[in-house]
Image (cartoon, coloured by chain):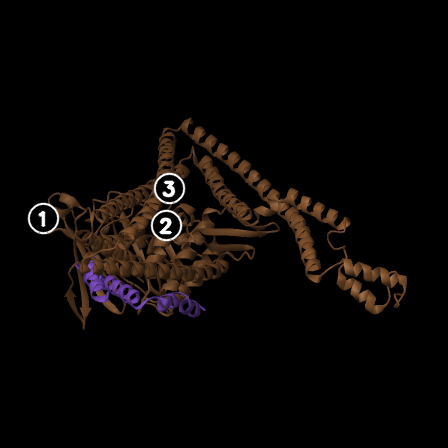
Amino acid sequence: MILQRLTLDNFRQFKGNQIVGFAQPGEKNVTVIHAENGFGKTTLLNALRWGFWGKMTKDMMRPEKIITECVATNDADANNTKAFVEIRYSHEEEDFILKRSITLAQQRHDFRQPELELHRVVNGVPEELKNPMALINGHVPEAMGDFFFFNGERIDHLAFDENAHQLKEAIYNVLGLELLENAIENTEKSVSQLRKELVKYTDHNGQELLNQSRAFEEEIERLNNEVKNHLDNQKAYQDEVQTISRDLEANEESRLAQLRRSDLENTLKAQNEALSDNESRIKKLLNEKAYYLLSDRLTAKGQETVERLESEGILPPKFTTTVLDQLLESEKCICTQELTSGSPYRAAIEELVSRASDKSLDEATQTMKTALSNLTTGGIDQKDDFKNSKERIDEIRANIGGLKDEIREISRKIREGDDEEAQDLESRRVSLTEKIKELSIDIAMKQNDIEEKERQKETIDEQATAAELADERGQKIQKEISAADKAKKLMEAILESEKEDLRAELNTAIQQNFSKIIQKPDFKIELTPDFKLRVTKSTADGPEDVARSTGERQITSLTFIASLIALARARKNIPTILENLWGGDFPIVMDSPFGTLGNTYRGRVMEWLPQVAPQVTIFVSDSQWQGKVEEMVGDKIGEEYLLEYHAPRANELAAQKAVIRGQSYVQFHESEEEFTDIIKM
Amino acid sequence: MAEEIAQSNSMQIFREAGDTEQKIASSAIKLIRRKKQEPGLNITAELTKVIKEITP
């Protein structure tokens, strides 16, 4: 999906009819919108979200006020006063026009029920389409909103482990794996339907099994819905915690404490990841090499026994018959004594050879002794490894304990401080954090329960399907169920294979892109098999998890998004069972794209981003624009705009003029009414 | 590299499956794609029909 044009009509502070044209894919694929904070950047970003999905981000104040306030006055004609957002875009080589509108009357009744039209443009003529919302979600799913239209200062949350499911969802959506997932789900539903049909042809036992299967199915569905609700609630609480954290940072009383806590929490996350890695390592060691750790007494006993048997002459001596044969052949002993025929020395060696018996016993004895020796050496190595891992785990646990204590202490100080606002915020934060933790526990329990019930259901289904039926129609349905089940397993195997292949491709892209921005050769990023973004640093003891700063997490998240979008472009060229799969082109629209990044990182981001994403739109303030960004973006700008803000007074921190390529532009005008104009440059 | 991987993994898995399973899987995927253009399509009903037709 590539944006072509955005038209606003009396939408929020954008009074009248205003247009933004977007730079198209190619050499000049960047659209720049210059605007200070408070001049309308976030509203413009939300115009896209509201247009596509009828919703705005949680930080939009008074979301019920969609129509420009100075237009939606009390004496305005409620049925003829309206606002709309029109978005022209292309998707899979077709052009579409989306229009979402709301009248004042509708806004007063329920602002969440705007009207929506979608047209496909065929030979220049718009043709209206039915079910617009379903089609739009097919072009640009709402779940992808955070990945295409986002605030750069808030993007860092994607780099947290707890948001791994969001990353997975994005990958599945953008790279077409969702098709396979849905196909599997619907095949399961068909199987379920066929089992219901089978009931008619089964005996009492068969019916009982099918009833049990259905009961499991309903229970699994209920649990899955609960897990989904919990995840949605968790996300909402996490968003609120982030908002509270920002508010605490903005509060004079709590600012330093909150900044310190952020640092500690980053370090805590890295330590938890390190703990998890080390625990996995020990588990692997125990699974694969426990015998080394547990067999030392047995090994010693074995060696003792072998030595005793050798000394008693029951086992061949320490030298093999091969050695003795070589001595006889050379007619010289290793002590240099001649072993000529008839000599007593030769006779003594020949007597030993006769006692040494056959080669196979020699070889067996030597093999056993080598094995015992390896076990002893290996056991020592593994014990050292185990001991080091255990010590490392103990050290990490101690660190984690210390960090948690310090974080708890910060919380206590804020709650008992002098500032009431900070106290309230902190109390709310504590309460939300508890709820998030409780939900995590419940989710884990429910997921275990789901897995167990799926296993039980599978056993019952196999029994039901295998039952012998007399009726031919019943037999046919059994075959249909069996075939559909196999098809489902086939798709699951394909999904697993494609998921892993694409993850590996994406991982390579993420690593390459990350290193272009971070430029620290000993830092490495990885998208793990469970979709977490991990950053490690090479040390003498192996890779170590890095506690990332907010800026580094922003870069991690941005790297993921851009790499995903770049891979989506290449998706259609990657052979797959999904014929004619079009991963598609997707835009990146970023408000305050650089978050807390310094000038150097900003420059690197803007040098790299237009190369990997087909279409980039950035909303930048004057301070974000100056320096490396202007230098890197300059020759890639396809469209450029300035937001001119009119109001009784501007934010004190907002620059009244923007300096763009050496020229000064007024961007604030004093006015009785508050509104924003979009000026094309 | 991606081409080689995809060719050797998922497409191989598909090729090694039985004819009936291949047809059912392909039909399921086609129906999901159709749904994007025809939101009112009842995939379960259509797929069940297809399974009945395909299964010998």
Q: Could you give the CA–CA distance between mark 2 and mark 1, rounded to whole angstroms?
A: 47 Å
Element under disc 1: loop
* Residue at image coords 29%, 51%: A463
Task: Looking at the image, tell me whether mark 2 or mark 1 is earlier in sequence order.
Answer: 1
Q: Amino acid at mark 1?
A: Asp
Query: Cβ–Cβ below 8 Å for labels 1 and 3?
Result: no
**Which residue in the protein does label 3 denote?**
A444
To the question of a shared chain for discs 1 and 3, the answer is: yes
Element under disc 3: helix
Residue A165's tag is 2
Residue A231's tag is none
Q: Looking at this view, name the residue that lies furthest to the bottom.
A: A123
**Which residue in the protein does label 1 denote?**
A77
Chain B: its colour in the image is: purple
Is A333 in front, or is A68? A333
Element under disc 2: helix
Q: Neighbour class for label 2 at 10 Å: few (<14), some, many (≥20)? A: some
Residue B6 placement (x, y as % from top left): 40, 67
Q: Could you give the CA–CA distance between mark 1 and mark 3, rounded to whole angstroms?
A: 54 Å
Chain on which label 3 sits? A
Q: In which quadrant of the rendered image does the N terminus of chain A lie?
A: bottom left
Is A45 in front, or is A126? A126
- A224 relative to A246 in the view: left or right: left
Is A368 in front, or is A486? A368
Q: Neighbour class for label 3 at 10 Å: few (<14), some, many (≥20)? A: few
